[in-house]
Image: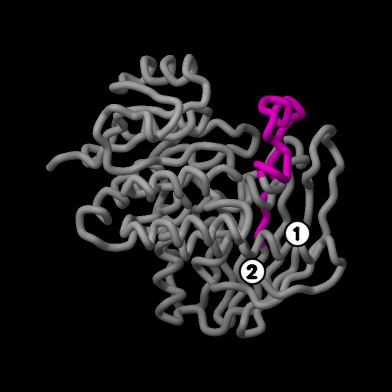
């Protein structure tokens, strides 16, 4: 089987994660890198044994089939539109982008070009999350009452000082809700559906030189009336694993770091499967466990080969950003809004 050949757009921290992950997936190959800094691009290509590098997609000399967008959040749409214009499939790092208009452009460009658009929301690949998804689809819990979601991580000032885009509305798109919490919020939308109402408060407490929140809380309502609370933070020293408590008609269960940590569902044995690897870091942006990215890459290659949607198609991936934007809008307006 011929591997799906990717060009990696961006050469930052997450780009290195994809380069390492791709080496472990037989059905994919990263053949080149694109960086606005030609010297940095060449160094990245040399480090990871790629065929070459360029300062734009149009300048890539090696044949390729698809791109991985590993640029800052607010630049994803530009890479997607450029790739679609060349007839290349698009896999975007999360979030899909940071505005509704940008996501519309990405989705439309890929649809018109007849190429696949996917997003790397790796929490959907975790086995315990997939078990819960199946049980919810079966109605195993009865009526859903409430979901309490907590993402309390810690990022030092040095994290925001490490790049000119970090902590900016223009390119990061927001603080812990958009940047660290978008994985959790995608998981929430995937499992339970899109809320219909959102109320929120956000603030900046422990960092300077940023124009986004570093702590906030939101309360959402689902179509059936269930309530969802979300707390997202980058000032919660020393940092805590992501947690979700789900309260239902038939009992309560809790998940910590994508693993079932408490099971109190009437008449049902705990279905927890022991996870492998270090799935999340509450104190660092570095990704040590690449298994989720490996799964996303393998699925995307299979989707292209089989002519189907990838695990997280663009139309689904945008839900997380739409909900996060509603959180910010509700906080800014001081009232309940509809996503």
Main secondary structure found in the magenta portion:
loop
**What residue would you read off at disc 1?**
328
**What residue would you read off at disc 2?**
147
Q: Residue 318 appears at what percent x and percent y?
A: 53, 61
Front residue (pair 75, 132): 75
Report the quarter where the N terminus lies.
top left
Q: Quadrant of residue 261?
A: bottom right
Image height of 2 relative to 309, above or below: above
Label 1 SS: helix
Q: Tell me the distance, in whole angstroms, between the alpha carbons under discs 2 and 1.
A: 20 Å
Q: Which mark is residue 277?
A: none
Image height of 26 relative to 331, above or below: above
Packing grade of label 2 (10 A; few <14, some 14-19, many >=20) is many
Q: Residue 57 appears at what percent x and percent y?
A: 39, 35
Left or right side of 188 for 126: left
Q: Residue 74 appears at what percent x and percent y?
A: 60, 45
Visible in this render: residue 127? no
Label 2 SS: strand
Visible in this render: residue 173? yes
Residue found at x 58% / y 60%: 320
Q: Which residues are magenta?
A: 149-172
Q: Is residue 159 magenta?
A: yes
Q: Mark 2 or mark 1: which comes first in sequence?
A: 2
Q: Is residue 288 magenta?
A: no
Q: Residue 45 appears at what percent x and percent y?
A: 37, 20
Report the quarter where the C terminus lies.
bottom right
């Amino acid at each position: 089987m011929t591997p799906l050949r990717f060009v990696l757009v961006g050469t930052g921290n997450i780009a290195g994660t994809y380069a390492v992950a791709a080496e472990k997936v037989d059905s994919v190959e990263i053949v080149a890198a694109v960086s606005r800094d030609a010297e940095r691009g060449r160094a990245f290509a040399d480090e990871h044994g790629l065929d070459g590098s360029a300062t734009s997609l149009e300048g890539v000399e090696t044949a390729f089939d698809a791109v991985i967008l590993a640029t800052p959040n607010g630049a994803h749409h530009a890479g997607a539109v450029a790739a679609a214009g060349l007839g290349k499939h698009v896999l975007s790092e999360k979030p899909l982008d940071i505005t509704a208009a940008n996501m519309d452009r990405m989705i439309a460009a890929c649809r018109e070009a007849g190429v696949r658009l996917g997003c790397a929301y790796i929490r959907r690949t975790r086995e315990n999350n997939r078990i819960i998804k199946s049980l919810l689809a079966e109605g195993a819990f009865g009526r859903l009452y409430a979901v309490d979601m907590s993402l309390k991580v810690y990022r030092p000032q040095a994290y925001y000082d490490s790049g000119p885009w970090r902590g900016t509305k223009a390119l990061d798109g927001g603080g812990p809700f958009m940047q660290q919490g978008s994985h959790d919020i995608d998981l929430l939308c995937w499992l339970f559906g899109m809320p219909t109402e959102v109320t929120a408060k956000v603030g900046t407490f422990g960092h300077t030189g940023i124009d986004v929140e570093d702590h906030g809380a939101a309360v959402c309502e689902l179509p059936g009336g269930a309530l969802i609370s979300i707390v997202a933070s980058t000032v919660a020293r020393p940092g805590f694993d992501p947690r979700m408590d789900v309260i239902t008609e038939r009992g309560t269960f809790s998940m910590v770091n994508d693993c079932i940590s408490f099971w109190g569902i009437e008449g049902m044995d705990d279905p927890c499967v022991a996870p492998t690897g270090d799935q999340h870091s509450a104190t660092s942006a570095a990704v040590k466990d690449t298994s989720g990215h490996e799964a996303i890459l393998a699925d995307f290659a299979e989707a292209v080969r089989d002519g189907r949607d990838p695990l997280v198609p663009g139309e689904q991936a945008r839900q997380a950003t739409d909900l996060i934007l509603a959180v910010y809008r509700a906080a800014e307006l001081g009232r309940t809004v509809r996503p």
